[in-house]
């Protein structure tokens, strides 16, 4: 299978239809869209939207995936059904690409970002049908979180269970300003330094959330030819629950020209990922 054929396959759901594109927060989506745990969400098409946009998107993704194989650092993975698994991790600064091959043939590829180290207790995992990827469910501080495990291919699944120090990051599907207040348990709370929170995004998979937060630092970074914002901000911050910080990445093509600024609240749908290694 060639890289183009792989790309088309990986970005289609189990019914042979294109994987569902995320709807904007508060927007509408087809009521027949698959629920959050539908197998069609086991794909990375929408995750690449956070990095690559505009014309030539598919060709750009193919180039990034192929470049990781050609120039990335190889990581020997756990053999799968008698086939050799190799992860190819290519990084530029805080951003990177992981392409995983089976006996030298591309099986999957996804963007990765350096995050903030957090203690996470992993209480469950839901392996994708590929056998190379998984959702990890657990607790970060006082919050229950499900995130994509970026290095799952590299070790036996049971080694991801229990207590770990993980790198927590997120990729934003869209980007825009948040309202000045949010209703939390019947209380109106200001979305500033005293509060940040996240809720499941019903249009997404189980590792997708809508995040309301206030950036503490924003800078422009690049993944080769692609410009993104790197946003340091709390995933959640509440007086009674403490704080869990993360790093979020968003392509500059998102948000219709909106530019995030430190100290200005944002609201965005996000794909959460953790690296356990």
Image (tube, rainbow, N blue to C red):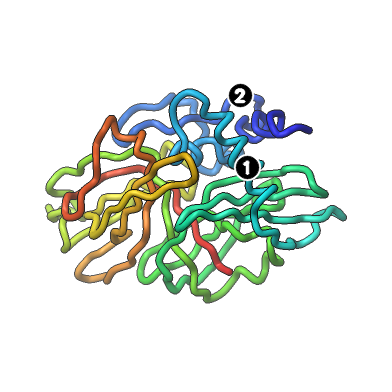
From the viewer's perspective, tell me whether residue 229 is left or right of residue 188.
right
User: Residue shown at 38%/44% (left/top)?
Assistant: 228
Q: Is residue 263 left or right of residue 269?
A: left
Residue picked out by circle 2: 17
Spatial separation of the CA atoms under disc 1 and disc 2? 22 Å
47, 239: nearer the viewer: 47
The residue drawn where x is 64% and y is 54% is 72
Residue pointed to by mark 1: 65
Quadrant position of the C terminus in the picture: bottom right
Residue at point 56%, 30% (across, down): 19
Percent position (x, y) of residue 150? 57, 57
Indicate left or right for 255 with 263 as reference: right
Depth check, mark 1 against mark 2: the one in front is 1
Q: Could you tell me residue 62's position as x and y percent?
A: 62, 35
Q: In front here: 88 or 70?
A: 70
| Number of numbered discs on residues | 2
Secondary element under disc 2, as helix, strand or loop, is: loop
In the rendering, at what x and y percent does residue 83 appear?
84, 53
Q: Which of 119 and 185 is in front in this view?
A: 119
Q: Residues within 10 Å of mark 1 (few under 14, many from 20)?
A: many
At which x and y percent is residue 147?
A: 49, 56
Pick the front one: 242 or 45: 45
Answer few, some or many: residues within 10 Å of disc 2's Cα (few below 14, many 20 plus, some between 14 and 19): few
Kindly give the residue lying farthest to the bottom in the view shown. Answer: 163
The relative height of residue 41 versus residue 231 in the rendered view (above or below) is above
């Amino acid at each position: 299978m060639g890289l183009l054929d792989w790309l088309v396959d990986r970005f289609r759901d189990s019914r042979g239809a294109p994987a569902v594109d995320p709807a904007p927060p508060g927007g509408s989506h087809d009521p027949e869209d698959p629920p959050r745990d539908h197998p069609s969400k086991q794909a990375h098409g929408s995750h690449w939207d956070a990095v690559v946009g505009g014309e030539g998107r598919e060709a750009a993704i193919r180039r990034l995936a192929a470049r990781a194989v050609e120039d990335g650092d190889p990581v020997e993975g756990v053999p799968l059904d008698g086939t050799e698994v190799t992860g190819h991790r290519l990084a530029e600064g805080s951003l990177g690409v992981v392409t995983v091959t089976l006996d030298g043939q591309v099986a999957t590829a996804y963007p990765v970002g350096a995050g903030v180290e957090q203690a996470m207790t992993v209480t469950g995992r839901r392996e994708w049908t590929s056998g190379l990827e998984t959702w990890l469910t657990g607790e970060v501080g006082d919050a229950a979180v499900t995130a994509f495990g970026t290095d799952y291919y590299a070790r036996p699944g049971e080694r991801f269970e229990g207590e770990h120090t993980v790198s927590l990051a997120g990729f934003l599907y869209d980007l825009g300003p948040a309202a000045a207040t949010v209703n939390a348990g019947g209380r109106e709370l200001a979305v500033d330094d005293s509060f940040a929170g996240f809720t499941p995004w019903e249009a997404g998979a189980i590792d997708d959330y809508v995040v309301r937060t206030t950036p503490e630092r924003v800078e422009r970074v690049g993944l080769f030819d692609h410009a993104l914002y790197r946003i340091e901000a709390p995933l959640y911050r509440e007086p009674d629950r403490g704080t869990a910080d993360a790093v979020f990445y968003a392509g500059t093509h998102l948000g219709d020209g909106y530019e995030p600024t430190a100290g200005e609240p944002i609201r965005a749908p996000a794909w959460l990922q953790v690296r356990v290694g």
